[in-house]
Amino acid sequence: FFFSSRRRHTRCSGVSWARRCVQETDFCELSFGPDSGKGLFGGMFNKSDLPNDYFSGVIYEVKPGYIDRIADKFRHSKEFKFNPKEDSVTQLATLNGLWTSYLEIEGRRYWDMQVQRPFELIAAHKKLPSDSTFREDLLHLKYEHDNQAQTSKEKLENQQRSDKKIREKFSKKKK
């Protein structure tokens, strides 16, 4: 699976004469999964030293007009091929990480879930009735009533399946 992203890189000239040129010149290609280059099923049945949430990629400076060309292709078809030898000017950086843990660019760690935490959750004193801690099956499990917990869980799952059928039926009517 390949993901492409672009970021704006602005080059201005002749600003005092109102002539401006904005050009997108950076392109990033990411591969997800430890065996992403091995076809549709990757290395599903092969053992890998890398976890499944591993990704790696390269950031390129691309030739003028490339971003506009792929943007036009992407409007009509969701597939395009990037050829670094033909489409790029230079490789700017390599990156890798685990999408659930960290991001490294050129070997420098820019984000690490163990270090940078955006905020700490504070438990509410008064919980809403819809809070998951009030789920009947979890309460039974907490007090080691395993049979009652299983029965409550099955009841909840059946209710969720029924709700899903109703949503699917409604979405089909809407189309």
Image (cartoon, rainbow, N blue to C red):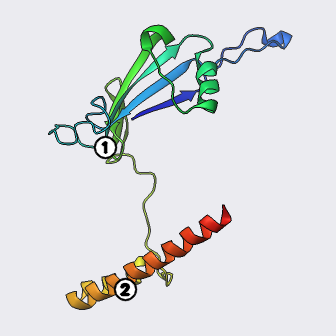
State the mark number for residue 94: none
* Most distant residue in the left direction: 47
Q: Which one is in front, 86 or 12?
A: 86
Is residue 40 shown above or below 140? above
Residue sitting nearer the eye, 113 or 49? 49
Where is residue 94? Give x, y as percent: 37, 22
Q: Quadrant of the N terminus?
A: top left
Specify whether 1 is left or right of 80: left
Q: Pinpoint residue 36: horizontal percent, then vertical percent.
A: 31, 33
Could you say which quadrant of the image residue 122 lies in?
A: bottom left
Where residue 50 sits, quadrant-wise, is top left
Which mark, residue 155?
Answer: 2
As drawn, 133 above or below 36: below
Q: Amino acid at mark 2?
A: Lys
Whole-number angstrom distance, CA of label 1 to CA of label 2: 33 Å
Quadrant housing the C terminus: bottom right
Residue located 27% across and 43% down the image: 52
* Amino acid type, residue under disc 1 in the picture: Asp
Q: Is residue 145 visible?
A: no
Dividing the picture into quarters, in which one does residue 169 lie? bottom right
Please say if 5 is above or below 159. Answer: above
Instruction: Residue 156: give x, y in percent of width and height.
Output: 39, 82
- Residue located farthest toward the right when viewing the structure as drawn: 17
Residue at 38%, 78% (x, y): give it. 157
